[in-house]
Amino acid sequence: MPTKQTFAEVFESRGVSRRDFLKFCSLTSVALGLSPELLPKVVHAMETKPRTPVIWLHGLECTCCTESFIRSSHPIMADIVFNMISLDYDETLSAAAGDQLEEVRKKIMKEYNGKYILAIEGNIPMKDDGVYCTVNGDSFLNIVRETAAGAAAVIAWGSCASFGCVQNAHPNPTGAVPVSDVIKDKPIVKVPGCPPISEVMTGVIAHVHTFGTLPELDRMGRPKAFYGTRIHDKCYRRAFYDAGMFVRGFDEESTRKGWCLYKMGCKGPTTYNSCSKIQWNAGTSFPIGSGHPCIGCSEPGFWDKGPFYSRLAEVSFLGTDTTADQIGMVAVGAAAAGAVAHAAVTAVKKKQHDNESEK
Amino acid sequence: MGRLIEEIYVWRVPVRVYHWINALCIVTLATTGMYIASPVINPPLGEAVWQHNFVMWRYIHYCVAFLFVGNFLYRMYYALLSDDQYAKFGGFRPWSPAWWGTPFKEQVASYLFLRDDEPNYVGHNPVAALAHFIFIFCGSAFMILTGLAMYGENRPGSLIEGVFGWILPVFGSSYNLHYAHHLMSWIFPFYVIVHLYAVFRHDVVDRTSVTSSIITGYKHKVEDERDL
């Protein structure tokens, strides 16, 4: 595969017309939330800039991010993005394997020192020197440190790499940590979700390629363009929420009518993602669209905020089946009981006191 | 218990106005807040477009919340900048070991029936002052900060989001923030019960008319009152 090809050259060699190329550029700018005036800039970048080399590492993960990525919705986009970022190392997608592939990684690290993008899927087990995830005989921890040293920036794919996900859910037997706990000296873009939406993944890469900078990040390190609002804010069932029309059980008429899933434990009101805007599988649907409450898979620690089908999580330090409301009611009940008991003792003491003063 | 010597004007108008606005706000906020967490009223018939049931609960919660914030700031202003000795933080020094000394111990002992006489104070007794600090000052500040952070979530890019948005990462996630706000709201019904009981009890036992003092402003001085 020749390196330093531009996007436009790749298009041309694959027989994609100029019209389709421009369509791709405008779609990309829309996906990135750019104003129309910036379209020429996108086109220019796609035509002239060499493809960004990407090393894509897989750690402790399930590969759902890659599965999502290769299903990028726009038909052309799926093919194009797959071929266009110079994806030089990826255990799942590379044709080469074993030592050959490892050599490619070393080569990219040397040739593009300080210029390549390191994409990490999955997180890093830290316990026992990282022995719980090894690639090619070395611990993933070492590989991440080594590869990150020469990277221009790091993209943390998915909830695992961003926040920890199921691997570092309680009790976290392997000591799994998100990428940001291991790499401290590089800019990190967190693209959470289990998996993240494919268009969000390709959009982040397109932004980095087009502008040579990372997209604007929010306080949690996520691209603002895709994680700026909650699922709830753009949910098509929002009208039912505002109206107070809630689904109360999956076997009810309200479910069939598509009312709000708030009471079924929907985490949409606390989940920052684009599911309700971009949706999944070429804009076909998303969990709430299929009648299932959002489980908040792009939020930190969402596995420990269960159960998925109730509004309030259990309070983990008190064992199972205890919610905040139960604690509150016990406290209020105790206060009331205490007040009654105290009043009773006060009355008895007062009586005694009165009797004594009478004597 | 001593003989009634004189009337003392303890709670001036700003304090009483603050108290009742605060009471109203807390009751409304707790009620609407609990309802928002678990809406129980059955869905109305008809189309969603004509209904504003749930959004009204939230709207009332927000409006009253801003009144609550304003009232809190007004009270802080009055406590810090007025010359009202009973409204200031003057005597409250929990960082100093001396504050936890005799008066505090006496008051605790009295509440635990370890003493027969009731120490009397014109303003708040030390235990009451501590309870107010924990529940009303810290509790309100916590609810205000977490509440404004959540309000900012509704309006990304707004001023409130810009000023209070940092609170969200402190809690780790939006869910944790909601959770903490909800869990902490239970301190208010807890406090209200203890507060009402303590006030009524002092009224019965001490006869300092503490209950009516928050309406009239007057308490009654009794002869064995300790100097503050």
Image (spheres, grey):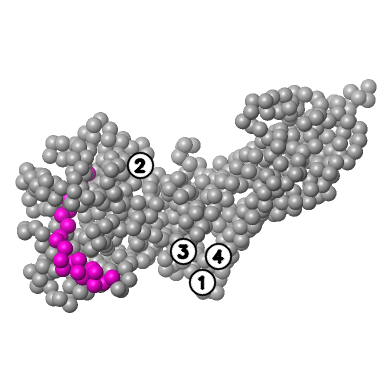
User: Is A186 rendered above or below residue A259?
Assistant: above
Give the structural element (helix, strand or loop) at label 3: loop
Viewer-nearest of labels 3 and 2?
2
For badge 3, the amino acid type reads: Cys
Residue at figure coordinates x 56%, y 69% from the top left:
B52
Task: Name the one closer to the observer, A269 or A324.
Answer: A269
> Where does label 4 land, which residue?
B55
Task: Name the one closer to the observer, A23 or A59.
Answer: A23
> Where does label 2 land, which residue?
A169
- Residue A253 visible from this viewpoint: no
Res A229 quadrant in image: bottom left
Chain letter for mark 2, please.
Answer: A
Magenta-highlighted residues: A38-59
> Where does label 1 land, which residue?
B48
For badge 4, the amino acid type reads: Val
Viewer-nearest of labels 2 and 1?
2
The label on residue A84 is: none
User: Disc 4 or 1, which lies upstream in sequence?
Assistant: 1
Query: Do pointers 2 and 1 mark residues of a single chain?
Result: no
User: Is A179 rendered above or below residue A252?
Assistant: above
Give the structural element (helix, strand or loop) at label 4: helix
Give the structural element (helix, strand or loop) at label 1: helix
